[in-house]
Image (tube, rainbow, N blue to C red):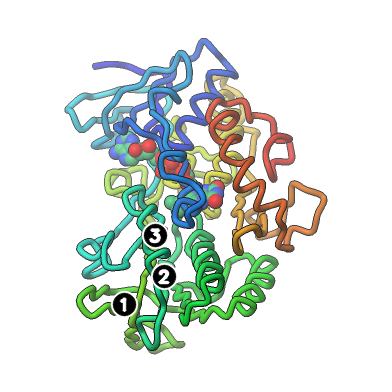
Amino acid sequence: MAHHQILIVGGGAAGITAAAQLKRARPALAVTILEPSSDHYYQPGWTLVGAGVFSLEETRRAEADLIPAGVTWIRDAVAGFDPDRNLVSTASGQSLSYDVLVVATGLQLCWDKIKGLPEALGQGGVCSNYSQHHAAYTWDTLQAFKGGQGEAGNAVFTCAPMPIKCPGAPQKIAYLAADVVAKKRLAAKVIYATATPGIFGVPVYAAPLREVVKRKGIDARYNHVLSEVRPQSREAVFKVTEGETSREEVIGYGMLHVTPPMAAPQVVADSPLAAASGFVEVDKFSLQHTRYANVFSLGDVSGMPNSKTAAAVRGQAPVLVANLLALLDGQPLAAAYDGYSCCPLITGYGKAIMAEFNYEQQPVPSFPLDPTKERWSMWWIKRKLLPGLYWNRMLTGAQHERRFIPGLKG
Ligand code: FAD
């Protein structure tokens, strides 16, 4: 059985960043990444793929090119966790032991929880920016959408119950679509039907977003949980909660953008590492597992109550690395994650609100500007600056210093 000093499960945004920072901090560490995929995607770019600004190819890199120098890559998937024996098993039947485990598998998209969706997706005007297979189809759909009288003129955008990754993404594409509809002067209604009770969970940013919704004439419907897609009749079925009661609402669509429900990957949810939620049970400040001292987690699979974004990983990775090294050194775990997350809320072509906040839902702006305002400069940062920061500084571990990172205060 192969033994690994530090075994990182998952080589996405979180796994690669943690590995790169660990190697920079201590080049002699033996770090291994267990990751099955040959491709790595910059998922925050998919909103702009769906809006026709980026090509999908611009968001893809070969995983092999991103594995930090000196890090071992095992191209396999975890199939089981046995933290009582410091072991993981893999899909190909290997057994790997470790000194320290870092769980960074991301989350799973539960398309099949919506009746009719798996069959409907990717054709007939049913699209989603949440999948690399369908983000480009969002743009195709938007271009093909002609509006029209009645339900054919409905462009419907859904948002699943929390937690989901990038909770702002479902509404960003609705704002961009509203711009396309307005530019083409289509007779159309943009409907944003969300499972959440309000437009955004952080009050200080919700206020300007409500104004955006109003200005763009978007029909926002809250407490709407998508339950079924009927492609034949082009209908989306929602369960709508009103106080103690619930009812069914059917909305006809000309196009439908779906944000699917999300959950921890089954292999994590079924393991002793999981909290009741299915996500990895870690201390929300130290990122150390609450029951297994040699296990840490970051990124979307971790069970902290932060907003799940790649930006959050930028806040988490330095903390995880500092605490993991402290553990190896027999020192107290002194670093603490403040819940930092950032959602560049694109409110149209050329406009964004850079929503940065912490566990307390307080704004933690990186720039000396009112963070609640829509700005062209924040659109430029989202479009031009952040992709390069991701590939060249975050995934290389260079972005260790908080001063390089929106919201990281050092
Ligand atoms: P991922 O990057 O998803 O990586 C998980 C990795 O684990 C993958 O490589 C996967 O192959 C691997 N894995 C899965 N199962 C196993 C297994 N069994 N064994 C081993 N490995 C496994 N974030 C922002 O900061 N700003 C944004 O504007 C933004 N917009 C977004 C828009 C969209 C449409 C989407 C989809 C996401 C967006 N995000 C945004 C969220 C961001 O992409 C994620 O929060 C981030 O990628 C999380 O990193 P992660 O490493 O935890 O998960």
User: Mark 2 or mark 1, which has the lower sequence index?
Assistant: 2
Residue at (59% x, 44% y) in the render = 285
* Front residue of 340 and 386: 386
Q: Quadrant of the N terminus?
A: top left
Query: Which mark is in front, 3 or 2?
Result: 3
- Furthest toward the front, the residue is 184
Residue at (41% x, 44% y) in the render = 56
| Marker disc for residue 261 | none
Residue at (49% x, 63% y) in the render = 173
Q: Position of residue 109 (x, y in %)?
A: 33, 54
Q: Quadrant of the C terminus?
A: top right
- Furthest toward the top, the residue is 28
> Which residue type carries mark 1?
Ala
- Crowding near the residue tagged with mark 1, few <14, some 14–19, many ≥20 C-alpha atoms within 10 Å: many
Ligand 1 quadrant?
top left
Residue at (23% x, 65% y) in the render = 120
| Dots 2, 1 in contact, CB < 8 A | yes
> Which residue type carries mark 2?
Thr
Read off the residue under disc 3.
138
Q: Position of residue 75 (x, y in %)?
A: 29, 26
Cα separation, mark 3 vs mark 1, equals 17 Å
* Front residue of 402 and 189: 189
Left-right relation of 13 to 318: left
User: Mark 3 or mark 2, which has the lower sequence index?
Assistant: 3
Left-right relation of 355 to 38: right
Read off the residue under disc 1.
236
Ligand 1 contact, mark 1 (Cβ < 8 Å): no
Read off the residue under disc 2.
158
